């Protein structure tokens, strides 16, 4: 378990040795999480583990759907957002973790 | 069964101590909402969470993916079907995890002082 505040003295290295160490660098920072089923999360990373189970604070979830117009076959993208103060995310839904996307 | 269970399989306690499930175990007795993989939601009192994230809830308000609401006295959700667990806003995460790990290690100390005789070989194979 990796946390923003250390639970007990652990042997954590400061070097980046494996991909999970990159996530450790984002502890207590805002991150972007792409999930399965066209979902995205933006929130503050409080804790994570090796399964990518995560605890995110002040989360905004975006669910994106595509509707196809039956006549014009136009693709209409809709997104639904909701805010959740504190969320536990099960790791098997996580696709990628990144710093928040900057627009432009 | 032709083979014995492997001794290298991690114990449930090891799984719990090394993952964030330990935080969910600290929610025993609290009312939370679990969002399932299939878009349904279950809001109820946490009775138990195990190492595999299987969740048992009581006095549940269950909303299926079509939005139909039903009341359930008891609900068991398999860990694989969990997408999110809404954590109560006022919960101190560090504190909850520390307390839960403390409980687990106290149980371990109890076990070493009062060793329950655990069979080392399975009775079927011998």
Image (cartoon, coloured by chain):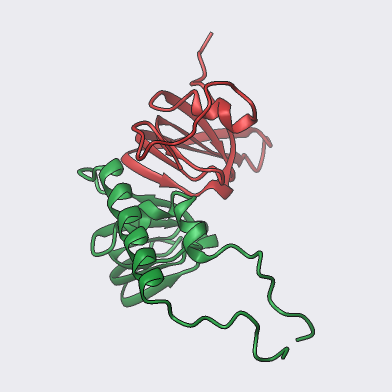
Residue lying at the far top in this picture: please name it.
A104
Q: Position of residue A64 (x, y in %)?
A: 53, 37
> Residue A96, position in %: x, y?
60, 33
For the N terminus of chain B, the image quarter is bottom right
Left or right, B21 with respect to B15, comes to left
Residue B45 visible in the shown view: yes
Quarter of the view holding residue A43: top left
Location of residue A84 (image quadrant): top left
Seen as rendered, the residue at the extreme right is: B2
B70 or A98, which is in the foreground?
Answer: A98
Please identify which colour was used for chain B in the image.
Answer: green
Q: Residue placed at 50% from the left, 28% from the top?
A: A24
Which residue appears at 38% of the width and 57% of the height?
Answer: B34
Q: Splitting the image into 4 quarters, where does residue B103 fall?
A: bottom left
> What residue sits 39% from the left and 54% below the top?
B22
The colour of chain A is red
Judge whether A73 appears above or below B22 on screen.
above
**Residue A23 sits above or below residue B47 on the image:** above
Return the x and y of residue A40 as percentages of the image width and height.
51, 35
Residue shown at 36% from the left, 60% from the top: B104
Q: From the image, which quarter does the C terminus of chain B lie in? A: bottom right
Q: Is residue B87 visible?
A: no
Total of numbered circles in the picture?
0
- In the image, taking residue A96 as reference, residue A8 lies left or right, namely left
Residue A68 percent coordinates (x, y)? 63, 40
Q: Which residue sits furthest front? A: B113
């Amino acid at each position: 378990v990796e946390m923003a505040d250390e639970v007990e003295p652990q042997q954590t290295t400061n070097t980046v040795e494996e991909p999970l160490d990159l996530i450790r660098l984002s502890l207590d920072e805002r991150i972007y999480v792409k999930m399965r089923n066209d979902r995205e999360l933006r929130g503050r990373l409080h804790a994570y583990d090796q399964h990518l189970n995560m605890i995110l604070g002040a989360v905004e979830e975006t669910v994106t759907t595509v509707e196809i117009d039956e006549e014009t076959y136009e693709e209409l993208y809709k997104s639904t957002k909701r805010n959740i103060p504190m969320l536990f995310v099960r790791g098997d839904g996580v696709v990628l973790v990144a710093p928040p996307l900057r627009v432009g | 069964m032709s083979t014995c269970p492997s001794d290298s399989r991690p114990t449930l306690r090891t799984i719990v101590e090394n993952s964030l499930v330990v935080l969910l175990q600290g929610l025993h007795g609290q009312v939370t909402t679990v969002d399932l993989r299939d878009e349904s939601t279950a809001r109820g009192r946490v009775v138990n969470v195990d190492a595999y994230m299987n969740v048992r809830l009581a006095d549940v308000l269950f909303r299926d993916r079509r939005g139909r609401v039903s009341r359930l006295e008891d609900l068991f959700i398999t860990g694989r079907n969990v997408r999110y667990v809404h954590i109560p806003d006022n919960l101190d995460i560090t504190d909850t995890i520390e307390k839960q790990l403390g409980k687990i290690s106290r149980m371990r100390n109890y076990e070493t002082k009062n060793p329950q005789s655990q069979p080392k070989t399975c009775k079927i194979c011998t």
